[in-house]
């Protein structure tokens, strides 16, 4: 994975990386033994993620019983220390932790809120690779709190589970570094009652094995992935497999209630994936597809390789949106939540591009329709370039974010605009991005000063009139 690991002590100049024992401003050598920070350094989400290590791979070996709503198993987290670690944290919500080991040796642990603190027998040296294994069990509980996020995380359903974790619900089913600044590869070994299908990211690495009334699925996502895109969606599903016209593996899965949507979901997911590859550049993963479950989430999520549609038959626009995220959000991931328009503004603009491609509304027409909102409209009071932690998924982040891209396209012309999208996706494939990087690349490719445009569209709490 490629976590943000800059100078010791701070990360992007934000929240101190180290424990409270380090005086602020002090320069600390990575070799100095100290606790890993309880947060990865996102000032808007100070407890999300953790400091002091970078995860390379998660190996999750999990058994779920839908009848008892009971999840049990082990998570092996393969990581590299970025400092000498006397102790470090994982994010985990609920469950009983039975045993924790570090490189096979028993480790002490403590729990407080959603932080699981691991205390290895000896400090882990800076730059050392290590594996922490956590055995845990219990009844998973999704995050239900939030005004504008609804219910997310591991959501039990009557025949299995609906698992969509943005922004920070991965901790409701496995211990990890639950923030998009740390990407990792994943292996999922999932055991469920016979007759239930387990769907996770990436591809099946072995034929499912059934024994004693239980079936085990082995899924592998070998491209870097952020925690909120990981899924283990379980239930009765009807599947359709194949490849897109350009040869990308394509798997659609629907709850039997959505049987009538299976063919369209499969065909459209394939066509749209192939189309985006001609616009944004090569598809970044090894398979595409989509999942429709019968849980009415009220949203869709761009789960890597398998977008999830919560309790509705998706139309072309939303499929175009979730598949555009495979480039913008999934391959190119944000380092800080404030930059969320780099995901949602791009995916919204992709919906307008898809309509333009299909000979429906032009992107210009979609832009004008939204620009017509009066100066008192809420969209102008929220600056999309700085997503607010208490209202992350505000319409402005989506719609005004998309309008920002159209304003840019008008200013620099189609040739530079589409070259910018492709260069952006290619240069940052499987990496992390910030708004500053995007505006710098736009200026470089166009040779224009774009400060006024980005200021007006992204950072001003009023309707842009000149740019
Ligand atoms: N990224 C998703 C989309 O735009 C939205 C996820 C919203 N998350 C939530 N917990 N409601 O399709
Ligand atoms: Zn989206």
Image: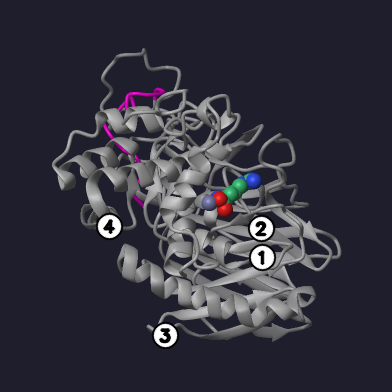
Q: Which residues are magenta?
A: 1-16
User: Is 170 contained in the magenta span?
Assistant: no
Which quadrant of the figure has residue 81?
top left
In front of the other: label 1 or label 3? 3
Structural distance between the alpha carbons of marks 4 and 2: 34 Å
Q: Classify mark 2: helix, strand or loop.
A: strand
From the image, tell me which residue sits under label 3.
245
| Rendered location of residue 32, percent (x, y) | 31, 27
From the image, tell me which residue sits under label 4.
418
Q: Classify mark 4: helix, strand or loop.
A: helix
The crowd level at tag 3 (other Cα within 10 Å; few <14, some 14-19, many 20+) is few
In front of the other: label 1 or label 4? 4
Q: Main secondary structure of the magenta part?
A: loop
User: Is 3 contained in the magenta span?
Assistant: yes
Tell me which numbered mark, 4 or 3, is placed earlier along the sequence.
Answer: 3
Q: How is the image coloured?
A: one colour
From the image, tell me which residue sits under label 2.
163
């Amino acid at each position: 994975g490629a976590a943000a690991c800059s100078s010791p002590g701070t990360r992007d100049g934000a929240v101190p990386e180290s424990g409270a024992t380090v005086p602020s401003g002090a320069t600390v050598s990575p070799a100095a033994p100290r606790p890993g920070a309880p947060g990865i350094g996102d000032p808007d989400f100070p407890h999300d993620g953790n400091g002091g290590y970078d995860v390379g791979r998660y190996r999750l070996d999990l058994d779920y019983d839908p009848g008892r709503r009971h999840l049990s198993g082990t998570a092996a987290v393969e990581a590299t220390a970025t400092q000498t670690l006397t102790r470090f944290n994982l994010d985990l919500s609920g469950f009983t932790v039975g045993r924790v080991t570090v490189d096979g040796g028993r480790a002490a642990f403590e729990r407080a809120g959603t932080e699981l603190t691991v205390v290895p027998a000896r400090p882990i040296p800076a730059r050392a690779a290590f594996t922490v294994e956590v055995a845990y069990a219990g009844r998973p509980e999704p995050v239900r709190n939030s005004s504008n996020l609804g219910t997310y995380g591991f959501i039990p359903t009557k025949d299995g589970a609906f698992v969509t974790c943005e922004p920070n619900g991965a901790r409701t089913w496995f211990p990890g570094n639950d923030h998009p600044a740390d990407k990792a590869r994943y292996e999922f070994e999932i055991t469920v009652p016979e007759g239930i299908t387990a769907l996770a990211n990436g591809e099946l690495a072995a034929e499912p094995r059934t024994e004693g009334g239980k079936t085990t699925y082995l899924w592998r996502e070998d491209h870097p992935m952020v925690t909120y895109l990981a899924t283990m969606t379980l239930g009765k599903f009807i599947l359709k497999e194949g490849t897109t016209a350009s040869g990308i593996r394509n798997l659609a899965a629907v709850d039997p209630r959505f049987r009538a949507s299976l063919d369209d979901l499969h065909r459209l997911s394939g066509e749209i994936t192939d189309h985006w590859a001609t616009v944004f550049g090569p598809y970044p993963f090894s398979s595409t597809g989509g999942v429709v479950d019968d849980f009415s989430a009220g949203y869709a999520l761009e789960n890597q390789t398998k977008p999830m549609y919560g309790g509705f038959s998706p139309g072309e626009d939303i499929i175009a949106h979730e598949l555009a995220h495979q480039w913008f959000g999934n391959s190119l991931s944000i380092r800080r939540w404030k930059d969320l328009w780099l995901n949602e503004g791009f995916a919204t603009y992709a919906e307008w591009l898809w309509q333009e491609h299909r000979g429906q509304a032009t992107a210009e027409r979609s832009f004008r329709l939204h620009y017509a909102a009066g100066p008192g409209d809420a969209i102008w009071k929220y600056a999309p370039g700085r997503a607010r932690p208490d209202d992350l998924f505000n319409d402005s982040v989506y719609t005004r974010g998309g309008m920002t891209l159209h304003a840019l396209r008008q200013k620099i012309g189609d040739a530079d605009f589409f070259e910018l999208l492709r260069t952006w996706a290619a240069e940052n494939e499987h990496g992390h991005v910030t708004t500053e990087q995007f505006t710098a690349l736009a200026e470089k490719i166009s040779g224009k000063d774009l400060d006024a445009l980005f200021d007006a569209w992204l950072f001003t709490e009023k309707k842009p009139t000149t740019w």
